[in-house]
Image: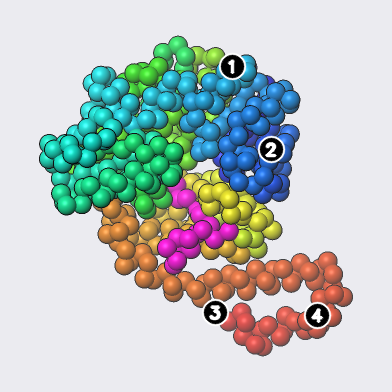
Amino acid sequence: MIKKVLVANRGEIAVRVMRSCREMGIASVAVFSEADRTSMHVRYADEAYFIGNSPSNESYLVIDKIIKVAKECGADAIHPGYGFLSENAEFSDRCKQEGIIFIGPSSFAISTMGDKITARQTMQKAGIPLIPGNDEEITDESKLLETVKKIGFPIMIKATAGGGGKGMRLVREEKDVIGAVRAAKSEAKSAFGNDAVYIEKYIDSPHHIEFQILADRFGNVIHLFERECSVQRRHQKVIEETPSPIMTEKVRREMGETAVMVAKAVNYEGAGTVEFIVDNDLNYYFLEMNTRLQVEHPITERVVGIDLVAEQLKIASGETLDIKQEDLLQDGHAIECRIYAEDPDNNFMPNPGVIKHITEPLGLGVRHDGYVYEGYKIPIYYDPLISKLIIWGKTRKEAISRMKRALYAYKITGVKTTIKFLEKIMDIPDFVNGKYNTHFIEENNEALFTPIKSSKKMEDIALITAYFDYITKLEKLQPQKLSNTLGNNWKDFGRKKGVLRL
C-alpha cells in the first residue's frame, strides 16, 4: 500500500485528496508557491515544501521541482489532482522513470485521449458513436469548404489540444468559415502551444452528460453512472447534478456500457470521465475523455457512496477493483454549485482579495469542499474557484430546495462571489423542471442578470454584520482600545442611527 502521497496541486482539490489520505492512514505532502504560503492545503498536510514563485509556470507546472521534492521527502506516490500536470503524459512518464507511482492512467492513455483527433480515430476503431466530423487536422484552406459542405451547417471548430472552451468557434454560415478557423487556430496556439484544429457537426440543443469510470490494471472496468453538466458559461461548467433529469434507464445502461468500452479501448487505469453530447432525442455521441479526477466528482460520491480518491489510491497501489457493476445503485439526488471569486455584474471578472468574513452552510445533506478562511488572501495567479457546495436530497426537488437554503446561508465578504448568481439559477423554471441544455444561461440571460444588481442591499447588510462581529470580538479582547475608538456606547450608537434596521 502507498505510504506517503505528494499532492501536486493546491486549493480545494489538494485539501480534498489529503482528507482521503488521512482516513486511510497515508501521509500527505503539500507543495506550495510564494502566493500559497498561507493556503489551507499547506496547513492541512503532514509536510509542506516550497517550490517557487507565484506564477504556475515557475512552481506547480515545473516537473523537475515536484519530482525533486517527492524524492527528498520519501513520497512513494504523486496525486496530480485536476488541472496543472494532471493530464500531462510527460509527467506520468517521468514519475515512472523515477520509481514514483503516478496516481492516474498511463502516458499512452493520457496522450491518446488528450489529442481530440487521435481520440476520435481511436474511438472510431472501437465502434464508439461519434459526432459527424473530420478526423484529420485542418491544414489546407482550399479544401476547407468542401469538408464543411459534407458535414453540413452548423459546425463547431475545435482545437485538438486542451479544453475549457479555448480554440472553439461555432459557425452557421459559409462566409464565416475561413475567419473562424484562423481565429480558433490563433487562440489554440496561444493557449496550448498547438494550433491544430478540426471540424465537427454542431448539435443544436446539446446536453453535456458524462460518465464516471473506475478501472484497475487487471482489465476490470466499471462506471458509476452519469453527471448532467449542461449549465455552462463559455463552455465552462457552473452547476452539475446526478442523476440527469433527462435520462432513461435504457439510455443510462447503454451509455454506461459505452463508457466502459471507451476505457477498455485505451487500457485505462484509475479514475476517469467519458464525456458525451446528447441531443433532444437522446442520441448520444462521444465527446472526449478526461484522464483525471473531475471537479464535480463529489456528487457521484454522494449518490453512489464511494470515495473516488480512496479508490484511486487503492488502484495505484496495485489492488484489484473489488466493486461490481451490479452492486452499484444511485441513491437520491445530488447537485454541485461551483463558487468562484468572480463578479457576475462585471462579466464574471475574477475578484481576488482578502476574505473578511465567511459563514459556511451547514445542515443535513450539505457537503462543503473549500480552502479559504477569514483573513486569507485569494491570489491573482490561479483559477478563482473558492469552493464547491454539494447538496444531497432524497429527490431532485428536495435537493434543489436544500441547495437554495444552503446558498442563502453561505456568506462571504471581502470579495465578489457567484453565490447570488447560483441562487438565482435555482429559481429559473427551466432548471427547476429539468428542461435545460448547454444554452441555459444565455436563454435565461435577462432573468439571471437583471435582478442581480438588487442584491447590493443584502451585500451591505452582510458587510455591516461582519463589521459588528469584528467589533464584538475586539471588545472582548481589547476593551480599552475599542472604547477609545468608538466610545462606551457604540452599540446604542448603532441602534440609534438605524444601522441595523433592515
| Classed neighbour count for the residue bearing mark 2: other residues with Cα under 10 Å, few (<14), some (14–19), many (≥20) | many
Instruction: For the residues labelled 1 and 3, say whether their Cβ atoms are less than 8 Å apart.
Output: no
Residue type pointed to by label 4: Thr
Tell me the quadrant of the picture where the N terminus can be found: top right
Distance (Cα) linking label 2 and label 3:
49 Å
User: Which residues are drawn in magenta?
Assistant: 328-352
Residue 313: image location, x then y, percent: 56, 24
Could you tell me residue 125's position as x and y percent?
25, 19
Foreground tag (1 vs 4): 1
Provide the residue designation for mark 1.
97
In whole angstroms, how far apart are the C-alphas of marks 1 and 3? 64 Å
User: CB atoms at circles 1 and 2 under 8 Å apart?
Assistant: no
Q: Residue drawn 54% across and 30% down?
A: 309
Residue 331 on the magenta segment: yes
Q: Does residue 174 appear left or right of residue 6 in this picture?
A: left
Q: Where is mark 4, residue-wise? A: 485
Question: Dot 1, how many residues are within 10 Å of its Cα: few (below 14), some (14-19), or many (20+)?
Answer: few
Q: Does residue 29 show up? A: yes
How far across and down, in percent of the image, does residue 217 sit? 47, 14
Query: Residue 499 is drawn in which quadrant?
Result: bottom right
Q: What is the CA distance from the residue labelled 1 to the residue labelled 4?
A: 63 Å
30 part of magenta stretch: no
Contact flag, marks 1 and 4 (Cβ < 8 Å): no
Q: Residue placed at 20% from the left, 52% from the top?
A: 176
Total labels drawn: 4
Q: How far is the residue under mark 4 from the one under mark 3?
A: 26 Å
Mark 1 or mark 3, which has the lower sequence index?
A: 1
Which residue does the numbered mark 2 point to in the structure image? Answer: 51
Of circles 4 and 3, the one toward us is 4
Kind of residue indicated by mark 2: Ile
Tell me which amino acid carries mark 3: Leu
